[in-house]
Image: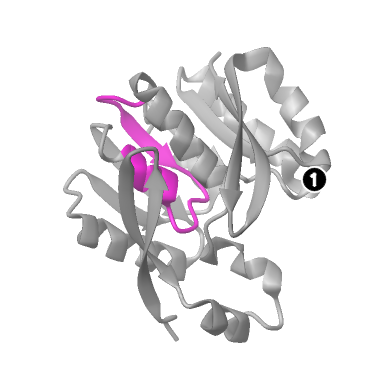
Amino acid sequence: MPLPLHLHPFSIANTQLEIYVPNAEAVQRAYSNNKDAAYWAQVWPASIGLCNFLQEHPHYIGGKNVLELAAGLGLPGLYAAGIAKEGTLTDREEQAVACIQQSVAHLQLKNTEAIVMDWKNAMQAPLPDVLLLSDVNYEPAVFDELLTVLEYFLQHKVAIIISTPQRLVAKQFINSLLPYCLQQWNGEVVWNGSATGVSVLVLEW
């Protein structure tokens, strides 16, 4: 059953971006037996941090074809759409994609689409100019597989912009990306009354 949605505004510097988010109580009921599966259903500080970075450094995505993997509610990809040539936002959860599609329609983005796709299958997708990822490195069991996907895109000359909260479990994975790091940005995101340190890495082969 589709989750009820409502519009929620987000402030990215001087830009207001209004996107659809699911009702929190409905999410709790729907995923009461598997809370991990509901990660897509809220905006996380790392995605706001990624938007802040893109606002400060628009040249990385200006006029480019952008692909966001594991997009969840798609805040970074939706923000990028205002600068990029084209945007494709993907997630493995059909309800996440349906939510993004409503946001795309609400924002009247003619250059953006949302499709169902697991990041594990991303190597089968058409190559973009830029790949966006936000807070995907929280499960150590998949770090090796995720690194393989990222290295595939890097080898094909796709720039990657990845954001992560500064959590201990993420440190090993981030260290494995540092040989490709062109720029690193560190900032603080205040969200829901809490401050979270966020790092954004720009990666190139």
**In the rendered structure, which segment of residues is drawn in magenta?**
61-80
Q: Residue at x 80, y 48 (%)?
A: 141
| Residue 77 is inside the magenta segment | yes
Quadrant (top left, top right, bottom left, bottom right) of the C terminus: top right
Give above or below for 176 relative to 3. Answer: above
Q: Is residue 136 above or below residue 72?
A: above
Q: Quadrant of residue 3?
A: bottom left
In the rendered view of the protein, which quadrant contains the N terminus?
bottom left
Residue tagged 1 = 140
Q: Is residue 5 left or right of residue 69?
A: left
**Does the magenta portion include 26?**
no
* Amino acid type, callout 1: Pro
Residue 113 falls left or right of residue 170 = left
Residue drawn at point x = 42 percent, y = 52 percent:
74
Local SS, label 1: helix
Q: Nearer the viewer, residue 177 or 146?
A: 177
Say which of 45 and 170 sits in front.
45
